[in-house]
Image (spheres, helix red, strand yellow):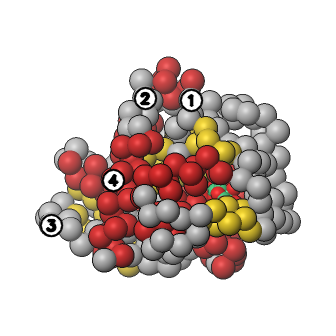
């Protein structure tokens, strides 16, 4: 099985490369390193692994057969896509178009990494796949949300019009080793602050909620979806919901350096609630998260502790 992973040197992409190699795939990892880093793949020592530095908003051609394309490439943290608005829109639109073209040419199965951001600031909780979302197209987050919504639309168009075998995973907040300490997301921010003995920056009053999935669970869900026969979107995330304030307190307690909490301005259009309904993933894939928040955070804190040494 020859398999492409776009964004393969990123946080999720690199863990997916690891799993695919374990399952016996020949893996071609494509990344332009805008937010990815070759450090995430330098541990891979396998003849079945190839890394290509390439920007998929430009077409790419392969002579050999390709069986699967996992399309993960995109800036994905709010700070990244605020800093890289055009790249985010281009990779969601042109990058997805190019990868679907490749899937069509190679008769490969294609999986789009979509996001809970397609639900925007959701008015229903938990979010089911049938919910159409509440997205501000012209707000600062719109560059990511709309790019991913377009990516879902073109994926379904290729599926319906060209008969391409496609999958769409809607990824909810995921955390674990290989996240960038400075990617601005809540998990690296809070853990980094707590480890340095600094105050934790809670945005707004901290009453907004998120549900955090450990990376190994997320990757297993994505893999199972690719191997399933289901073409409509599936939520993969952990349904255990916490307020951000609760989450800050959990991290302060686990790191144990007596940090305090300070409140900062809430970013524009920051979703007030987020929690996946994972009924579909349970029924179709027999998947549900296994790693507890405590165990996952322990691993992640250990990883960041090493980095900050
Ligand atoms: N957040 C926070 N402090 C931080 C970073 C993030 O309170 O230092 C909040 C942010 O406002 C949001 C939640 O944590 O409500 C999750 O933010 P993140 O950037 O991780 O991802 P999002 O779920 O918003 O895409």
| Residue 112 drawn above or below residue 143 | above
Q: Earlier in the sequence, mark 4 or mark 3?
A: 3
Residue 50 shows which numbered tag? Answer: none
In terms of secondary structure, where does tag 1 sit?
Answer: loop
Marks 4/3 in contact by CB < 8 Å: the verdict is: no
- What's the CA distance linking mark 3 and mark 1? 35 Å
Q: Earlier in the sequence, mark 2 or mark 4?
A: 2
Dot in front, 4 or 3: 4
Comparing 13 with 177, the one in front is: 177
Dot in front, 2 or 3: 2
In terms of secondary structure, where does tag 4 sit?
Answer: helix
What residue does disc 1 label? 278
- What's the CA distance linking mark 1 and mark 4? 24 Å
What residue is drawn where x is 74% and y is 68%?
264
Dot in front, 1 or 4: 4
In terms of secondary structure, where does tag 3 sit?
Answer: loop
What residue is drawn where x is 56% and y is 26%?
280
Which quarter of the frame holds ligand 1? bottom right
């Amino acid at each position: 099985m020859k398999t492409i992973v776009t964004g393969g040197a990123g946080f999720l992409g690199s863990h997916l490369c690891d799993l695919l190699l374990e399952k016996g795939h020949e893996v071609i990892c494509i990344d332009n390193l805008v937010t990815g880093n070759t450090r995430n793949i330098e541990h891979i020592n396998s003849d079945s692994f190839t890394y290509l530095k390439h920007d998929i908003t430009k077409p790419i051609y392969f002579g050999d057969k390709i069986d699967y394309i996992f399309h993960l490439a995109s800036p994905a943290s709010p700070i990244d896509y605020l800093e890289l608005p055009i790249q985010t829109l281009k990779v969601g639109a042109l990058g997805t178009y190019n990868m679907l073209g490749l899937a069509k040419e190679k008769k490969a199965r294609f999986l789009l990494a979509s996001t809970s951001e397609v639900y925007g600031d959701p008015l229903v909780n938990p979010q089911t796949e049938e919910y159409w979302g509440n997205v501000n197209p012209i707000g600062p987050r719109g560059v990511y949300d709309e790019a991913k919504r377009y990516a879902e639309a073109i994926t379904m168009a290729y599926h319906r019009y060209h008969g391409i075998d496609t999958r769409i995973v809607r990824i909810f907040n995921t955390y674990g080793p290989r996240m960038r300490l400075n990617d601005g997301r809540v998990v690296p921010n809070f853990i980094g602050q707590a480890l340095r003995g600094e105050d934790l920056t809670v945005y707004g009053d901290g009453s907004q909620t998120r549900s955090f999935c450990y990376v190994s669970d997320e990757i297993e869900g994505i893999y199972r979806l690719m191997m399933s026969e289901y073409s409509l979107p599936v939520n993969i995330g952990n349904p255990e919901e916490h307020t951000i304030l609760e989450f800050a307190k959990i991290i302060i307690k686990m790191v144990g350096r007596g940090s305090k909490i300070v409140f900062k301005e809430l970013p524009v259009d920051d979703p007030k609630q987020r929690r996946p309904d994972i009924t579909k993933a349970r029924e179709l894939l027999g998947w549900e998260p296994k790693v507890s928040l405590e165990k996952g955070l322990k691993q992640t804190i250990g990883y960041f502790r090493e980095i900050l040494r």
